Amino acid sequence: MAELKEIIISSDNIKTDEYLVNMGPQHPSTHGVLRLLVKLEGEIVHNVQPHVGYIHSGIEKMTESLSYTQIPHLTDRMDYLSAHMNNEAVVCVENALEVEVPERVKYIRTIMAELQRIASHQLWWCATGMDLGALTTFFYGLRDREDILDIFEETCGARLTLNYSLPGGVMFDIHPNFQNRVKTFIKKFKKILPEYDELLTGNVIFQERSKGIGVLSKEDAIAFGVTGPSGRASGFSCDVRKHQPYSAYPLVKFNEALGTEGDTFRRYQLRIAEMWESMSIIEQLIDNIPEGDYTAKMKGVIKLPEGEFFQRVETARGELGVYIVSDGKKNPYRVKFRSPGFSNLFAINHIAKGWKIADLVAIMATFDLVIPDIDR
Amino acid sequence: MAFEKYDFTPLTQSIHQGLLENVSPLMTMIIEWTIIGLLYLVFVAVFGLFLVYAERKVCAAFQQRLGPMRVGPWGLLQTIADFIKLLMKELIQPKSVDSFLYNLAPFVVIIVPFLTISVLPFAPGLQSLDFDIGVFFVTAVSSVGVIGVLLAGWASNNKYSLIGGMRSGAQIVSYELSVGMSLITMIILAGTMQISEIVELQRNGWFIFKGHIPAVIAFFVFVIAGTAETNRGPFDLAEAESELTAGFHTEYSGIKFAFFFLAEYINLFIVSAMAVTVFLGGWMPFHVGGWDGFNAIMDLIPGLVWFFAKVLGIIFLIMWFKWTFPRLRIDQILTLEWKYLLPINLFNILLMAFIVLMGWHW
Amino acid sequence: MKSFFNYISEILRGIWTLLVGMRVTAKYFFTPWRNVTQQYPENREKLVLADRFRGEVVMPHNENNEHACTGCGICELNCPNGSIEIISKSIVTEEGKKKRIIDQHIYHLGMCTFCNLCVKTCPSDAIVMAQTFEHAHWDRASLTKILNKPGSKIMDGVKE
């Protein structure tokens, strides 16, 4: 008995150490070259230190030597899953020049942006499923995204790096098949989206893995500048489409999906809700595209007046801010992109503390990180 | 009965007699051991490769893909090509591993399926060891595998591997309990632990039908716990790809990695084979009481075919789980075991004991 | 007692959600004709690419080996990453006038980001995007292409 007591006492003196694990730069769940320095005690996460910059491509600096028509093609490469929404930031240039773009352009841009949002959320959905271990979701999501990419390919000529919006308008007029194909897609996807819910949302394992995990309060969301679906899940009403409407958004009726819980499950549900909203926006616009030019008359060389210009657009990940300082020349003096991924990433440390490694993966999945968007 | 003509006993007996007449009893034993050993070796290699191929095809079909199509017709030779590739790959050993344990682990892991497979009755007369504690032997031996996983996790000197090894340790220790309990439920019904006896008792009805509700519950608990024991999705925490890259076998390469891989699939076979033997009548054909014509047709199918058809059915079910469900978290896995499966199991044993006591089971 | 029923209903509800998920995957498992895999090198003939697909910049020549490029250099100016180099030369026309024409329209496929700006801004529509996409080569040098064919001339009637 005495021996047993000794053993029990000595086991109290066993010290457990925290240890550091490098998640990344090559890791299956960081979706790219992001490095997270995770401090763990056993399975419990104590600290998450993101190290960014592994895929820094210097887009902001490169823009200083490019003309305003050339810049949009670089923005494709920031957040490649919302390439069209990034392109749409040329609204900033149009506003600076005080150019009135044709109505048709606004409609086309909005439809394209919403299609892109659905495509982005589809990829996010399949990656989330995969991060949580449901590998089949990956292929179902990609299968449906393919339809949208085919539509893009037909109209924009590219599937991923679209470069479709240019200052003053769009690159091409819409393809004659465009409206029909979009309508077929919406019809088809409306049937498939409930299947997503059956497969993953309703699944008891998924709900256990996500409900109440990684709660981000509204105050913290505002403090960290978490925008997009991740911020809205916490109740932070931050939809630029609603608050500062651009393109054709003033003309359509849609709900800003908002949550209050701010947990992983809410962030997940919110993106599913956004897909429904996007489909309803497209349905409102697709039959009413007005006739007209697909581009406004622009000068061959665009020169912005001297000054500072700022425009916000809502990408699939949150708020993209474009800040241009112009000295009146054909190249900008300085361009700053406020990318949503960068702000969202740094909220992870705050909410992942005390949860397990598996939860950290789930939290990261529902923050929908795209690494080139973070590093630019 | 008609299917008795597929009995392998005369064949094995004649081999045994022939050997005894020609060589000494000792030599007979050695030759028989060698033959059986080689047969199991070939079976494990071939069936393991087949299962890898089957998994890739099944998962492809679930995901609306085609799976391997390039090597051989319908990609049939793909796994053989993969195996040759693994054989020829360099065995990389990281600098600061515990060399002895690191090299030992794959062998511990691969030995387990060989031990367990020896008591499985594939067909009438085709069983190499027939202990009177056969079921007990299977549960005892199959828990040795976790030692290999723990060794691999510890000796690799990699944090991911260590987490994977620890997870798998906690998981298998817990789920052993459910596997054991659900088997005990059936042992109460059978009244014996001898596997050949258990199969024989199911001649006029599989245990899953004979044992009423408790047998059905025990069957599902066994399949769930068995999935967890083989470290397969949704319980594949030990190698959770999105969390731990590859878990306990992160640092292994070449044929050592292949050992882990092969062991996983053979364990899958063994769990399914045990489920078939204990719940679904082993190699016994499917009979419906009263339908004599139907039963006669069923009897024409050899026992070996019945056995493998049932086993592949269970394997398909387990693969279906893996390709549908997300992975559980470590604490949820333990919750599932201790808060759900264990109480259900204990209650189930009581129920089964009551049924047997009342004599409702025949 | 209530908590006991909760416990049971929780289990049953959980199992139901799992079965619903399994139904979805089973639906696709047993309908193999819905498979989406395309076997690429085999279906090369049947592969249809959108006519706007941006695969590579080419310069169409007519049957007389004539193209529409004046060598003005606007594409070179508009290219964001210097994939196009225009080398022009001076010739003396039959009327005795000095004239600059294109010598070599060099296109670096390896640097191109397929932004379509060169095609869009070309005043004489001399270059277009081709739908080729199999650009893999063993040698990087073969990615540098000269778009105007040797001995080609400018078409009549192209505005200079």
Image (tube, coloured by chain):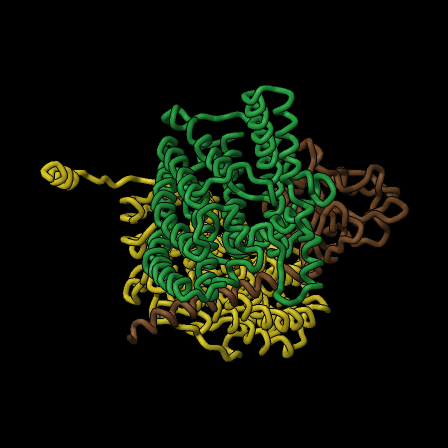
Chain colours: A yellow, B green, C brown
Quadrant of res B23: top right
Q: Residue A35 at what x, y percent from top left? A: 39, 43
Quadrant of res C140: top right
**Residue A328 visible in rendering:** no
Which residue is more in the foreground, B225 or A291? B225
Q: Residue B266 at what x, y percent from top left? A: 53, 41
Task: Name the residue located 63 percent from the left edge and 29 percent from the top edge.
Answer: B17
Q: Is residue B290 above or below residue A359?
A: below
Quadrant of res A243: bottom left
Query: Quick check: C81 left or right of A310?
Result: right
Q: Is residue A287 above or below residue A47?
A: below
Which residue is more in the foreground, C23 or A366? C23
Task: Name the residue located 50 percent from the left edge and 46 percent from the top edge.
Answer: B195
Query: Quick check: B297 left or right of A209?
Result: right
Task: Name the residue located 67 percent from the left edge and 51 percent from the top edge.
Answer: B3
Q: Residue B88 at what x, y percent from top left? A: 59, 26
Task: Name the residue located 34 percent from the left edge and 66 percent from the top edge.
Answer: A262
Q: Residue A120 at what x, y percent from top left? A: 53, 60
Query: Quick check: C144 left or right of A86?
Result: right
